[in-house]
Amino acid sequence: MVDADLARRAAQYAALGDPSRLTIVDELVRSDRSPSELRLRLGIESNLLAHHLDVLEDADLIVRNRSSGDGRRRYVHLRPEVADRLRIGGTGPATEALFVCTRNSARSQLAAALWRAITGQPGSSAGTDPADAVHPGAVAAATRADLDLGDAVPRTLAPDETHALVVTVCDRAHEQAGMDAWLHWSIPDPVPDGAAAAFDAVVDELRARIRAITDDPKAA
């Protein structure tokens, strides 16, 4: 009898045997994408893309989630364990980065702090509609993760800002201000939940995302 985990891995490798599907997974290591964004990047028709996404989903490689901003939109997300299991990831040396969310009170602040801690490179954050202060839940989560938010204060994303890497970490910010060259990580907002576990989950996901796009995904 074939071990269930072995069969699952074999199905995943088989799904990646098509160049278009491997290209999709390579893109999703870096950034969540809507089907329309993937279609433009691959230059294929929507029905063929839908077929490729169905194959990847059946192989347990991706999930498709509804946007927390525009509910008519969905984002395709690589399952978090896939990059490590299949030894894919790393886009080159880390550089300075800007992280953007709507309120700039939790996700983007935590992302910038993690970026600095993991890569040793400058990391900053901004919001499309910033709050008055960083959320206490984010401050507490940072402390638990040995991160320093210091005297961080939410600020407005400037229209002419330029950074080597820009990542939107909430759907609404991506839909309001996302540029084609920016990456997008569709991360649920922990603020409505308010529980410590929700903020800690954001820290864990951001850490995994950062490690997945740096040269050494096991670093830090």
Image: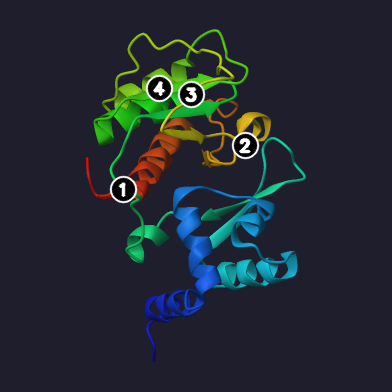
Measured as percent of width and height from the top left, residue 180 is found at 59, 41
Which numbered disc flags the more N-terminal residue, 2 or 1? 1
Which numbered disc flags the more N-terminal residue, 2 or 3? 3
Q: Is residue 61 visible?
A: no
Give the numbered dot on residue 124. 4
Amino acid identity at mark 2:
Asp
Crowding near the residue tagged with mark 2, few <14, some 14–19, many ≥20 C-alpha atoms within 10 Å: many
Q: Is residue 151 visible?
A: yes
Q: In this rendering, is residue 118 above or below 135?
A: below
Q: Residue at x 41, y 30 (%)?
A: 111
Q: Helix, strand, or loop for circle 2?
A: helix
Q: Residue at x 62, y 17 (%)?
A: 129
Q: Helix, strand, or loop for circle 3?
A: loop
Which numbered disc flags the more N-terminal residue, 3 or 1? 1
Cα–Cα gap, marks 2 and 1: 26 Å
Give the numbered dot on residue 106. 3
Q: Which residue extends farthest right?
A: 72
> Which residue lies under the disc numbered 1?
92
> Which residue lies under the disc numbered 2?
171
Which numbered disc flags the more N-terminal residue, 2 or 4? 4
Q: Helix, strand, or loop for circle 4?
A: strand
Amino acid identity at mark 1:
Gly
Amino acid identity at mark 4:
Ser
Lateral position of residue 146 relative to residue 77, left or right: left
